[in-house]
Amino acid sequence: MSTRVAWITGATSGFGAATVDRFVAGGWRVVASGRRIERLQRLVDRHGADRVHPLAFDIRDEAAMRAAHAGLPADFAAIDLLVNNAGLALGTVPAQQAELAQWKQMIDTNVTALVTLTRLLLPTLIERRGAIANISSTASTYPYPGGNVYGGTKAFVSQFSLGLRADLHGTGVRVTSVEPGMAETEFTLVRTGGDQAASDKLYAGAQPITAGDIADTLWWIANLPAHLNVNRIELMPTSQSFGGFQVHRE
């Protein structure tokens, strides 16, 4: 049996980097895409160019995405698994104070880029009876103040995953929406513009999900028997639960 290949987006940090490590350790080849070439090169240095093929481009740049895909070496071209991990949250303020440019950036990254790459790889995934794992969030289900567009984009990812399942019926392609809760990565640093104190305060004492936890979850999903599909999986640290409704009183 030939070595299987995964394309993992957002591979330069957090869930993405940990997932590259997990799948290479399991014997897969990985196409690792992200914006920061120096971080992608570290993955190559760690695992070897025969196991990791780096693609440095902004996921929002469709022309760059298509060029990167067209230039894949033969050993990395037959994609068996797409992990749509690239995404971000920007800002924590209420909608009426939010910056429209940040909203558009989240939509362009979390929604438009995700569907563009998915559509590009669907013929190969169908041919190989492969799988798609879309990284959504508990924010897709549980709203919170300041979540506004970020939560909306993740709700799209979860629903899009279910729609793909319906459309891909009979092809053998499996689709899963992975919906993590509080996880300690660079997520909050990006969201707050690099505020390390805010990140430290959020995760202090909470024993949050780790990048390795999500990598292990994705490994489990990808290696289930071909007749099993996990439609969606929601994960929270034991310390986190849904807190219910807000009530404003005069």
Image: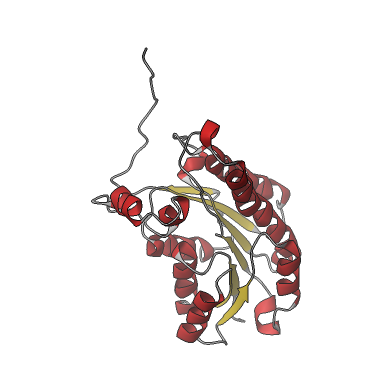
Residue at far top of view? 250
Q: How many numbered tags mark residues here? A: 0
In which quadrant of the rendered view does residue 78 lie? Answer: bottom right
In which quadrant of the rendered view does residue 96 lie? Answer: top right
- Residue at 58% over, 47% down: 102
- Pick the front one: 157 or 36: 36
29 lies above or below 57: below
32 lies above or below 176: below
| Horizontal relation, residue 3 to residue 18: left or right | right
| Horizontal relation, residue 231 to residue 209: left or right | right
| Horizontal relation, residue 55 to residue 28: left or right | right
Asked if residue 28 can be seen in this view, the reply is: no
Residue at far left of view? 205
Asked if residue 114 can be seen in this view, the reply is: yes
Residue 101 drawn at (x, y percent): 62, 46
Residue 147 drawn at (x, y percent): 49, 39
- Residue at 27% over, 53% down: 207
Q: Quadrant of the C terminus?
A: top left
In this picture the colour scheme is: secondary structure
Q: Quadrant of the N terminus?
A: bottom right
Residue 138 drawn at (x, y percent): 46, 43
- Pick the front one: 92 or 56: 92
- Pick the front one: 226 or 38: 38
- Pick the front one: 247 or 24: 247
In which quadrant of the rendered view does residue 163 lie? Answer: top right
- Residue at 64% over, 62% down: 59
228 lies above or below 212: above
| Horizontal relation, residue 128 to residue 9: left or right | right
